[in-house]
Image (tube, grey):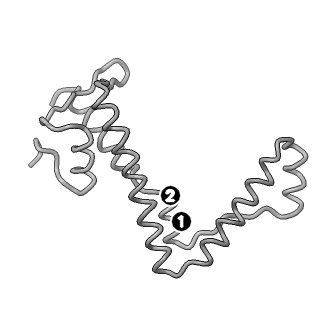
Amino acid sequence: MSEELARYKAFIDALVAMKESIGARRLRTNWRASLRTPDEMAREQRRDTSGATEAIQQGFQRYNAFVESLTPEQREFVADLLQHERESGIHGVLVALTDGGYQLSQNGVQLATEPFGTESYFDFVARATGDAWPDER
């Protein structure tokens, strides 16, 4: 196998490996955002003159209240939506790279371009659904 092909396959497989949505996983495991204690908030606010600390704390409170309001079925549905959007985002970037004619390289080695006669986004979807590489079947 050529170095260009090996790096292409490693790139697509790396994207597949990172396709899991952290937000979806958190919803499925009933994760709650950690709220700061009043003492922690006071310390952070002394260092933060932009108001970001308070905004983050309020975001965490809204997130926790929203998650607590969901039934298990609703939580799973929202998690599925988040997961779909994560995978769609990766797919969309690959479409933009392909349609824009971009070529990827790593440490000066160009990755193979459509080595199996299919676009990178097709290869991503195939690998994400468990298909073997065409040259490994």
Q: Position of residue 12 (x, y in %)?
A: 29, 41
Please identify the quadrant where the N terminus is shown: top left
Above or below residue 101? Residue 29 is: below
Identity of the amino acid at label 2? Ile
Q: In this view, does 56 lie to the left or right of 67?
A: right
Rendered location of residue 32, percent (x, y): 64, 69
Picture disc at residue 17: none
Question: Circle 1 sits on which residue?
Answer: 26
Q: What element carries label 2?
A: helix
Task: Write the residue at 45% across / 80% down.
Answer: 73
Where is mark 2, residue-wise?
22
Q: Name the side, left or right, on which 130 lies relative to 97.
A: left
In 3D space, how far apart are the residues under numbered discs 2 and 1 (Cα atoms)? 6 Å
Q: Give the SS element for disc 1.
A: helix
Where residue 76 sits: x, y (%)?
A: 45, 73
Residue 6: quarter of image: top left
Amino acid carrying label 1: it is Arg
The residue sitting at 87% across, 43% down in the picture is 47
State the image coordinates of residue 67 (x, y, percent, origin top left). Answer: 60, 72
Determine the image quadrant of residue 90: top left
The foreground one among 21 and 13 is 21
User: Tags 2 and 1 in contact by the CB under 8 Å rule?
Assistant: yes
Viewer-nearest residue: 124 or 99: 99
Please, is residue 12 above or below residue 66 in the view? above
